[in-house]
Amino acid sequence: MRIMSLLRLVRPPNGLLMFFAVLIGVLFSETRAINPQQIFYAFVTSFGLTGSSMALNDYFDREVDLVNNPRRPIPSGEVSPTSAVALSSILAGAGLLTAFLSSTACFLMAAVALAVSTVYNMFLKKAGLVGNFAVSFTVVAPFLYGSLLADGYVSWRVVVFVVLAFLANTGREVIKGITDVEGDAVRGVATIARKSGLRTASRVGAGFYIAAVMLSPLPYLLKVVNILYLPLVAAADAGFVYSSIRIIKNPEPAEAKKQKNLTLLWMLLALISFAAGGLA
């Protein structure tokens, strides 16, 4: 079992993105009152819980990945299922410990996010849109965590960004269902793509993207961000519109995979726009 295989299992870039989202939650809190120790704890919590979720996801997806992603660490034999569960447990324990050391509110938020992620991996993957919503909650949880870390409560300004991120990620999850349609059939996963067809799924996914785009001026209109937000979020919006058009025109797994990957770039641009807009 190689170190690189374990890293592929836990997907470190996802953990770094979650940590970045926590910092944005802090940025849009009322006080922004955190110290270096809290920042370190937040990093461990973000990386630990995200890595735990990713490893557990691959454990429960090991049969589907034999069809969809046979080169993933578990189906390829690089990491055993038992090792994946053990690693997931260690990372979850570390993440919860540092959340507990941060504050009671942070611990509760981390525990809820971990619980939702675990329930999704075990049961909700077959639940279609409900499962998509569960994933999106875990994606926006770091924004909430950052606000709790700084203020002890969730600032209304953070909620604005939570709504945008929730919509965009739900769109991506629906599109992902098109990408995984063959493997999902193995386990009876009831995605929109399987229940209603690829074209319907493409339109629903694009609809969530466009909803996020339409609401994206809201932070500026509410004077939550400065003008630096506008050009950056406009670039992200253009990307989401492009991906929406492409997937509606060609709602096939290969195109869906391409656009699903591209939307990670659009989401990163959106995160950068949040950060730039809140620095003043």
Image: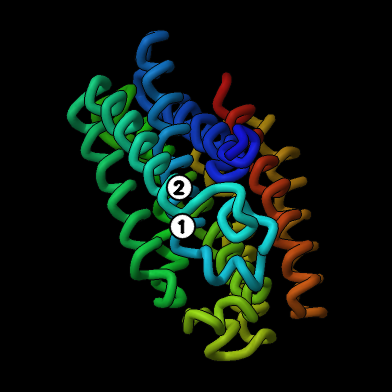
| Element under disc 2 | helix
Q: Of marks 1 and 2, which one's residue comes earlier in the chain?
A: 1
Name the residue beneath numbered marker 1.
59
- Is the residue under label 2 in contact with that under label 1 (CB below 8 Å)? yes
Task: State the SS at label 1.
Answer: helix
Relative to 246, 21 lies left or right: left
Q: Amino acid at mark 1?
A: Tyr
Q: In the figure, residue 249 lies in which quadrant?
A: bottom right
Q: Residues within 10 Å of mark 2 (few under 14, many from 20)?
A: many
Q: Please say if 125 is above or below 84.
A: below
The residue carrying mark 2 is 84
**Above or below: residue 117 compared with residue 176:** above
Q: Residue at 55%, 57% (x, y): give it.
A: 169
The answer to whether 83 appears left or right of 254 in the picture is left
The answer to whether 134 appears left or right of 20 in the picture is left
* Gap between marks 1 and 2 measured at Cα: 6 Å
- What residue is at 64 percent from the left and 57 percent from the top? 76
